[in-house]
Image: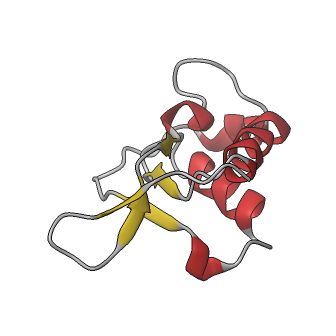
Amino acid sequence: MTGFEKRSLGRTSVEVTVLGLGCATLGGHRVRVTRDKAEAIVRAAWARGVRYIDCAPFYGYGQAERCVGDALREMPRDEWIPRAREAAPRWPDTSDWDRC
């Protein structure tokens, strides 16, 4: 594992790695990303020391969050920090949800 420097998150005592993984693309909004590829991306970031994960319900209407959760399910929960944002999602036609 490559260790990244950690910094405090704002004025809190929570420390995050200076490099994080943005997961908007894993939701498949702009490009198609298979579930296997999405989970492989998350695991590759983990293997390289990334412990700050930016995800939100709007990223693929929850698809990115599910991919992150499944990829990190076996990792020690106290070793990574999720950053989740809330938004008022507009739920799509769910017939296409098998993408991720």
Question: Position of 53 compared to 83: left or right?
Answer: right
Q: Quadrant of the C terminus?
A: top right
Looking at the image, the residue that sits furthest to the top is: 31
For the point 49% across and 36% down, the residue is 24
Looking at the image, the residue that sits furthest to the right is: 36
For the point 59% across and 74% down, the residue is 79
Asked if residue 79 is positioned above or below residue 72 in the image, the reply reads below
For the point 52% across and 26% down, the residue is 29
Question: Position of 38 compared to 25: left or right?
Answer: right
Question: Position of 8 compared to 45: left or right?
Answer: left
For the point 74% across and 72% down, the residue is 75
- The one nearer the camera, 48 or 25, is 48
Asked if residue 53 is positioned above or below residue 35 in the image, the reply reads below
Where does the image place residue 31, in percent across and percent down from the top left? 61, 18
Image color mode: secondary structure
Q: How many numbered tags mark residues here?
A: 0
- The one nearer the camera, 39 or 46, is 46
Where does the image place residue 4, in percent across and percent down from the top left? 53, 51
Q: Quadrant of residue 98?
A: top right
Question: Position of 98 compared to 28: left or right?
Answer: right
- The one nearer the camera, 4 or 80, is 4
Where does the image place residue 67, in percent across and percent down from the top left? 69, 52
Where does the image place residue 64, in percent across and percent down from the top left? 59, 47
